[in-house]
Amino acid sequence: MKSNIRLTMTALLLTFAVAANARFNAAKTDAPPVYFGLRAGVGASLYTNIDDPVALATPIGGIALGFKVAKMPLYLELSALYMNMGSKVKAWESRHYRRYDDHHFGTSSDSWQKADRFTIDNHSVMVPIVATYRFYANDHITIEPFTGLYGSYGFGNKRVDFGLREGAAFGFGILYVNVGVNVGLVGQNRVEKDYWLQDGQHGSLFLGVGLNF
């Protein structure tokens, strides 16, 4: 599934770039060779292979740096972002989660009913690197599909994650808007004191705004 997502997005990006090259390369030989960006946004993060995960809303923020790597407007963008790459879990769905509730709410037979879900925070530094192609609708408006990878370190579970990052961005002068998905490839279990929680791989949607200079 994840391999198919990446192959599909890569094929689409290459197809768009080849189709657009003849139209846009000659018209935009003055596309900037380097840009610096500020990023902010919101995300919905969860662990994809645990029992009934619930999305955790999270702010996103950071910086980006892009380099033009061909005569056509093809760029590599490197970012450094903050994101809570955690999840919420429905507490009653598993005996593992009932043990969590007993730990936090007491050991009575009905204690687990007092909380329908709990939060697994994983405040993280994420470093995505993506290839992006700029389609110029005119001199000031661009459509920018992107595909790539990310690496991250979670301060909540003290673990490294790697994954896929796919999406599209839109430029309006210096204003930048993006939307996309992150698909983690590494199991993200908790620290030893929360050993009863199952492993889960990170997955998230994101929507962001920013400025490119």
Image (cartoon, rainbow, N blue to C red):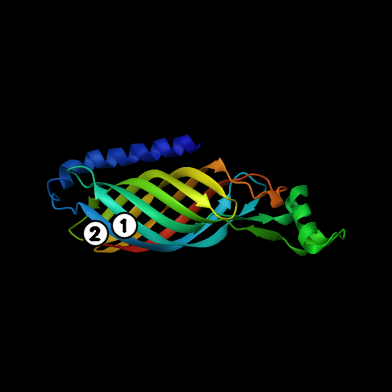
Q: Residues within 10 Å of mark 1 (few under 14, many from 20)?
A: some
The image quadrant that residue 110 belongs to is bottom right
Q: Residue type at mark 2: give it.
A: Ile
Identify the residue position indicated by label 1 in the image. Answer: 170
Q: Residue type at mark 1: give it.
A: Phe
- Residue located 45% across and 46% down the image: 151
Identify the residue position indicated by label 2 in the image. Answer: 141
The image quadrant that residue 32 belongs to is bottom left
Callout 2 touching callout 1 (CB < 8 Å): yes
Count the numbered circles shown. Answer: 2
**Left of 211 or right of it: where is 22?**
left
- Residue located 45% across and 43% down the image: 164
Q: Nearer the viewer, residue 174 or 1?
A: 174
Q: Position of residue 65 (x, y in %)?
A: 30, 54
Q: Residues within 10 Å of mark 2 (few under 14, many from 20)?
A: some
- Residue located 16% across and 45% down the image: 23
Q: Nearer the viewer, residue 160 or 173?
A: 160
